[in-house]
Amino acid sequence: MPPTDRPRTDLPQTDLPRTDIAAPAGMDVARLTAIDVHTHAEVSRTGHPSLTPELMAASEKYFAAQGHRQPTIEEMADYYRRRNMAAVVFTVDAEHALGHPPIPNEEIAEDCAAHADALIPFASLDPWRGRAAVRRAHRLVEEYGVRGFKFHPSLQAFSPDDPMAYPLYEAIAELGVPALFHTGQTGIGAGVPGGGGIRLKYSNPLFLDDVATDFPELQIILAHPSFPWQDEALAVATHKPNVFIDLSGWSPKYFPPQLIRYANTLLKEKVLFGSDYPVITPDRWLSDFAKIDIKPDVRPLILKDNAVRLLGLTPG
């Protein structure tokens, strides 16, 4: 059962607890123009893909990105470095549900460390791994410098409020790093018979209301405009001080009006730039973002400042 004796906090949204960690060695935070909190490592050093060919093809078709290159982490670093940006990089460990081994988290962390001026490593652990996932979470943060964790409930076939995942959340909260959850529809499996077995219901952001309640010290990022549950995402992020929203996976020109309204007002310090690179490039995202009605004083918060605060990127 979810814990019932956990301490609760009711901190204002602008005074959240933060892990005071320095920026990765070599990262000049002041120089950065933006921090992309949502990019994917799609191929390992040995050429192992993050998804099966069927699911990758479905995702490419959904994003109209057929035939896009799967960049190496070195190429990703060069891409962001040339734009004076930094990027959070992760894969998805969904081996239990998909039967497809993930790209090793340790490899991603090591390769990001080699390009620490531009890349920030997150890890992904399948919650179905149980205690082994808890042990690896500690090792990945303490020995490999991982700075957050990515979950994809639909791919991993679990409801985020399932108590079986709570020990892993407990560990991540203790480690003082954020947890990023895919929310809303996914292009992975779109158009494949039966959606490739992927169930959309697990990515309703309302499931994360329980997680945010039971783990008030865990910083939670709701990834993407959460179609068809945008209002649920806005409600949770407005109500829970420890819940943020990243704007990845959609061109800003398609953002629903209520998302723009909340980003400009109540959630201006809780909304983060994310692209979903490589299927959506930051160049395309930023070009469209420049054309939507975001207040001038809010733009730098979304593009960089909120991520600096959330990720604890104090000058090293």
Image (cartoon, rainbow, N blue to C red):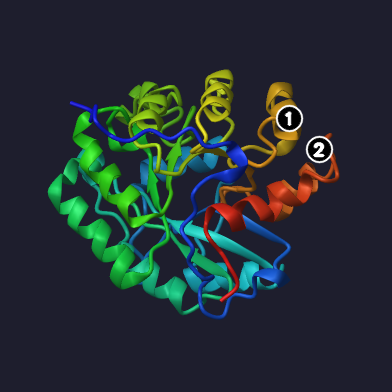
Answer above or below: position of 79 versus 251. Answer: below
Classify mark 1: residues with Cα within 10 Å, few (<14), some (14-19) or many (20+). Answer: some
The answer, for residue 181, to whether it is visible in the render is yes
Q: Residue 230: which quarter of the image?
A: top right
Residue at image position (49%, 49%) is: 17
- Relative to 90, 134 lies left or right: left
Provide residue 135's location: percent of width, then percent of height. Answer: 18, 57
Provide residue 21's location: percent of width, then percent of height. Answer: 48, 66
Q: At numbered mark 2, what does the secondary structure look like: helix, strand or loop? A: loop
Circles 1 and 2, Cβ within 8 Å, touching? The answer is yes
How far apart marks 1 and 2 lie (CA) works out to 7 Å
Provide residue 234's location: percent of width, then percent of height. Answer: 58, 25
Q: Amino acid at mark 1?
A: Ile
Residue 294 - label:
2
Q: Which of marks 2 and 1 precedes in the sequence?
A: 1
Identify residue for label 1: 260
Q: At numbered mark 1, what does the secondary structure look like: helix, strand or loop? A: helix
Q: Amino acid at mark 2?
A: Ile
- Relative to 123, 133 lies left or right: left
Residue at image position (53%, 20%) is: 232
Q: Nearer the viewer, residue 306 or 126?
A: 306
* Total marks placed: 2
Residue 9 - label:
none
Q: Quadrant of the N terminus?
A: top left
